[in-house]
Amino acid sequence: MSSIQSANARPVAADAAVAAATPAASAGPATGIAPSLVLLLASAAGFSVASLYYSQPMLGVLGADIAASDQAVGLVPTLTQLGYALGILLLAPLGDRFDRRRIILIKAAVLAVALLLSGLAPGIGWLLGASLAVGLMATLAQDVVPAAATLAPAEHRGRVVGTVMTGLLLGILLSRVVSGFVAEHFGWRAVYVAAAGAVALLGVAAWRGLPRFAPTTQLGYGALMGSMLSLWRRHGALRRAAWAQGLLSIGFSAFWSTLAVMLHSQFHLGSAAAGAFGLAGAAGALAAPLAGRLADKRGPEVVTRLGAALAVVSFASMALSVVLPMQWQLGLIVVSAIGFDFGIQAVLVAHQTIVFGIEPAARSRLNALLFTGMFIGMATGAALGSLALAQWGWMGVVGLATVASIAALGVRVWGRKG
């Protein structure tokens, strides 16, 4: 216990050590960090997280080409997401123990190889193994965000983190669109090969442009993982952030995991229409920098409450669809999706700003805990959303999302300090 305390007792010294080791961080007059470096970090976050979603639009073509069953092909995105969740919990905390630059370079190299192996896969077994590796290494994004928070001065941290999160969210938004287009015109293997090349080029750019980061702890791996429990117990701000983001993620996941089924049953629309709703994610990409700037000016607590309130209103407004003409119902769902996506992504950026300010020496572990709570909420929302749809229809999903968002707002407004 004494080693954990001594490793985390010097947050100011830790920031100073990193600042001394990162001369490139002082080049930007507006944010204290060079714009080219922010662009590099945002691109790295976007391209790495995009690797999780390339497979989804092309599973049908992919399965037919390698003679795999629908059930087996369905394991491709499942293993990719599982690898990402495991990587957040088991690998992301290493950013506090080792030079983040080295971790980013290693993950970029392995991710590029894993994507290339996916594109060259002769059968489903090979592809599944490569997909798990892709998920594990795509956690590069969760090393980039704490790196950005470390490089940015405290007064501009929200803005810089928000900009990097914009890159990450654009990666999620555009990955399906790009992979679907490329797969249709050049084949599914071309998607993976092109993605591998892009990640490799980013790795070279990171090798040339990223400064070194001084480790903030000397804990061994077992003690490092054990310290995460100590961080959770010690910091009420972390617990509130994880609980609130997890609750918002329940509503978010419940909506998106049941939308296609509802559109097919009520509006007789196919998967292409459901995919088009994903363009509402552009609102999240827009929310990130705006939320970061507002967090710098008014404080992140204000942003969490405003964002959660917007999510409540957006989810609840979909209940009005029962009294609207059919042609207006889709428009209401689109507007509501834009509203709650904007609100939830704004809350995420504000939560990261809060969490990264708790203990500079433990930013990677704190980020891992925040995202673990978020992914637990996503998984819970998918399960409860399907149950609500089966038992009570679309209004059951709307009610679930609304109640979860109200609970998140309650955590932010009435949650105990400390």
Image: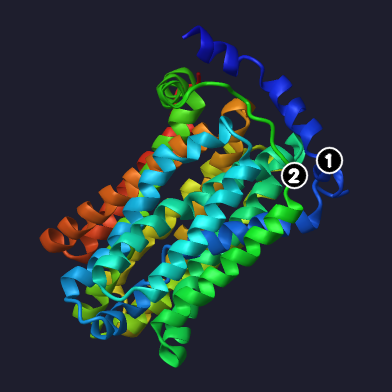
Check residue 302 in the rendering and tell me which mark sits there, or answer none: none
Q: Residue at x 39, y 36 (%)?
A: 243
Look at the numbered discs 2 and 1 and tell me whether their residues touch, using CB distance below 8 Å: yes
Q: Quadrant of residue 268?
A: bottom left
Q: Report the amino acid beneath label 2.
A: Pro
Residue drawn 48% across the image and 50% down it: 139
Whether residue 188 is visible: yes
Q: Which of 120/73 is in front?
A: 120
Report the side of 156 relative to 253 (left or right). Answer: right
Which residue is nearer to you in this view: 95 or 321?
A: 95
Q: Quadrant of residue 18?
A: top right
Q: Residue 161: horizontal and vertical position, in percent?
A: 65, 48
On screen, 262 above or below 2? below
Q: Position of residue 169 (x, y in %)?
A: 54, 61
Q: Is residue 264 left or right of residue 150?
A: left
Residue at 22%, 65% (x, y): give it. 394
Residue situated furthest left in the rendering = 391
Of residues 283 and 9, the one drawn nearer to the viewer in this rendering: 9
In the image, taking residue 99 as reference, residue 33 lies left or right, namely right
CA gap between label 2 and label 1 equals 7 Å
Q: Position of residue 389 (x, y in %)?
A: 18, 62
Q: Which residue is mark 2?
A: 211
Q: Which mark is residue 23?
A: 1
In the picture shown, does residue 135 fall above or below 264? above
Sequence-earlier tag: 2 or 1: 1
Circle 1: residue type: Pro
Q: What x and y, as percent, mark residue 360?
A: 63, 28
Q: Which secondary structure, mark 2?
A: loop
Q: Secondary structure at mark 1?
A: helix
Q: Residues within 10 Å of mark 2 (few under 14, many from 20)?
A: many
Q: Residues within 10 Å of mark 1 (few under 14, many from 20)?
A: few
